[in-house]
Amino acid sequence: MSAPLSSSARGRAALATLAAAERPLLFLDLDGTLAPFADRPMDARVPPATRRTLQQLRLGGALVVLVSGRSVAQVRQVARTPVDAILGDHGARWATRHRVRPLLPADVHAFERAVARVRARLAGRPGLRLEIKDRSVAVHFRHLGHAHEHQEELAVAALLRQEGLRALLGHHVVDGQLPGVNKGHGVRRWLAREECRGCDALLYAGDDTTDEDALRVVRPRGVTIGVGPRVRHAALRTRDPRTFAAWLARLAARRARRR
């Protein structure tokens, strides 16, 4: 069971560990973790105060890696602040400042065929919006009547599985991923990279079912934080992006004082 982030002994110990580290590596989900949800997903933004905190953390020696189901281009639009790397499309692609390249193997042609069939089968369905990304697909339900939303989500998830995709139910969305493409595999692959040598503390924070794979990877070796009520595999929890941003600001201040 997860413990409160700010009021538990485990929470205080996690803060102390990350504050004292020379080079902590912070994997941070975007929507629902750093950026509050918006009625339209492309209207979501990381608040200015949170952006300043991220830069303060980077100046203090932390590596900040954003991990998102969004494409790399969309992550940049929502985050609007420099970071050390982006793992987009559930870890399938990664970006540094100047390059975007594959991180996980993916059968692009199989994905394109599956998406074409999904698009045809969902055509004309009211209240649904299909978002096709580089290596994943999302079906959004934000404008569907709540009385039928869960039944529709289950039906769409079944459809995605029929097309050979892994289906994950999230916050008013069902994500379809190619087998082997998930945030856990992306984080594990990133941890094997040269950039991670010398990192002496590790954090993953996320809010939804698509973060569970990564939380399971990080939890045995680092700090894991669930933002909101949906996450099951985090050791610590906090209520929403606002409370998580306040905790990040505390971490940045502690690290600044240490230096």
Image (cartoon, rainbow, N blue to C red):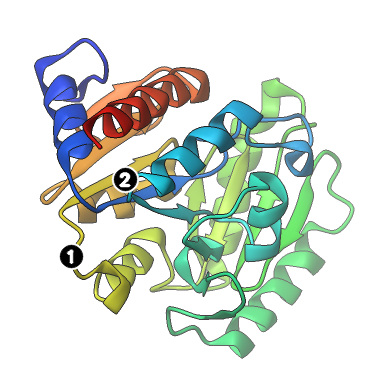
Q: Is residue 228 visible?
A: no
195 relative position to 98: left or right:
left
Residue 126 x, y percent position in the rendering: 86, 41
Q: Element type at marker 1?
A: loop
Note whether 93 is above or below 86 in the view shown: below
**Quarter-wise, where is residue 8 in the image?**
top left
Q: Which residue is mark 1?
A: 198
Q: Are marks 1 and 2 in contact (CB under 8 Å)?
A: no
Q: Nearer the viewer, residue 171 or 118?
A: 171
Picture coordinates of residue 136, whole percent (x, y): 59, 66
Q: Which residue is mark 2?
A: 204
Camera-side residue of 64 and 115: 64
Which label's residue is closer to the chain start, 1 or 2? 1
| Amino acid at dot 1 | Gly
Residue drawn where x is 78% and y is 44% of the image: 128
State the SS at label 2: strand
Q: In percent of the image, x 31 and y 54: which residue is there? A: 213
Between 130 and 26, the residue placed more toward the observer is 26
How many residues crowd around disc 1 within 10 Å: few (fewer than 14), some, or many (20 or more)? few
Residue 109 is situated, as x and y percent measured from the top left of the image, at 63, 89
Q: Based on the displayed image, in which of its 4 quarters is residue 182 positioned? A: bottom left
* Residue sitting farthest toward the front: 259
